[in-house]
Image (spheres, rainbow, N blue to C red):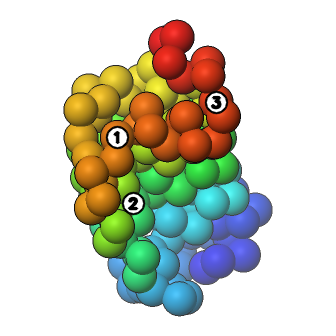
């Protein structure tokens, strides 16, 4: 199934999909986000939205890490969720200087992680001043 996701072969994914955790505590939706497999991600949204991997990350967070804008747009239903460190997708987007995602996730702006950091602090740490201007 992983190969089908990596190839963005949604028909093969439909044949093989059983909803299982695949590898390293990752669901299919996480692997689709990681590989920017839009067709597979779209198929999996109704089945695995809000699933967390072994690090507590959602597919939205992974899409932000990988600067996958189409993924971010279809995964906005995961906005506001936090990983095991209390980070949100906005914090990850700010760290990555992913401005398009930051614009879509502004509702998370006041959230803090486990250390009391906000997305603006993450942006400052990564020297991403553009985030402050959005």
- For the residue pair 80 and 28, the one nearer the viewer reads as 80
Q: Earlier in the sequence, mark 1 or mark 2?
A: 2
Give the image quarter of residue 120: top left
What residue sits right under mark 3 in the picture? 128
- Contact between labelled residues 3 and 2, with CB atoms less than 8 Å apart: no
At which x and y percent is residue 59? Answer: 45, 57
Q: Earlier in the sequence, mark 2 or mark 3?
A: 2
- Residue at the spot 66% in from the left edge and 49% down from the top edge: 66
Element type where label 3 sits in the image: loop
- For the residue pair 1 and 48, the one nearer the viewer reads as 48
Tell me the number on the disc at residue 58: 2
Give the image quarter of residue 9: bottom right
Q: Which residue is outermost to the right? A: 7
Quadrant in which the N terminus is drawn = bottom right
Relative to 76, is 32 above or below?
below
- Contact between labelled residues 2 and 1, with CB atoms less than 8 Å apart: no
User: Marks 3 and 1, how far apart in space?
Assistant: 14 Å
At which x and y percent is residue 38? Answer: 60, 45
What residue sits right under mark 1 in the picture? 118
- Contact between labelled residues 1 and 3, with CB atoms less than 8 Å apart: no
Q: Dot 1, crowdedness within 10 Å: few (<14), some or many (≥20)? A: many
47 horizontally vs 40: left or right: left
Can residue 100 be seen here? The reply is no
Relative to 124, is 129 above or below?
above
Q: Which residue is outermost to the top? A: 133
Q: Earlier in the sequence, mark 3 or mark 1?
A: 1
At which x and y percent is residue 49? Answer: 31, 56
User: Marks 2 and 3, how far apart in space?
Assistant: 23 Å
At which x and y percent is residue 42? Answer: 47, 46
Can residue 121 be seen here? The reply is yes
Element type where label 2 sits in the image: loop
103 horizontally vs 13: left or right: left
């Amino acid at each position: 199934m992983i190969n089908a996701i990596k190839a963005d072969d949604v028909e093969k994914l439909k044949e093989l999909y059983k909803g299982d955790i695949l590898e390293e505590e990752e669901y299919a939706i996480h692997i689709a986000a990681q590989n920017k497999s839009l067709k597979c991600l779209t198929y999996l949204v109704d089945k695995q939205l809000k699933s967390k991997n072994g690090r507590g990350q959602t597919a939205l967070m992974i899409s932000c890490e990988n600067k996958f804008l189409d993924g971010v747009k279809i995964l906005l239903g995961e906005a506001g969720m936090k990983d095991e460190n209390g980070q949100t997708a906005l914090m990850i987007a700010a760290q990555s200087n992913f401005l398009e995602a930051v614009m879509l996730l502004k509702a998370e702006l006041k959230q803090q992680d486990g250390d009391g950091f906000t997305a603006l602090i993450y942006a400052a740490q990564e020297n991403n001043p553009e985030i402050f201007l959005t």
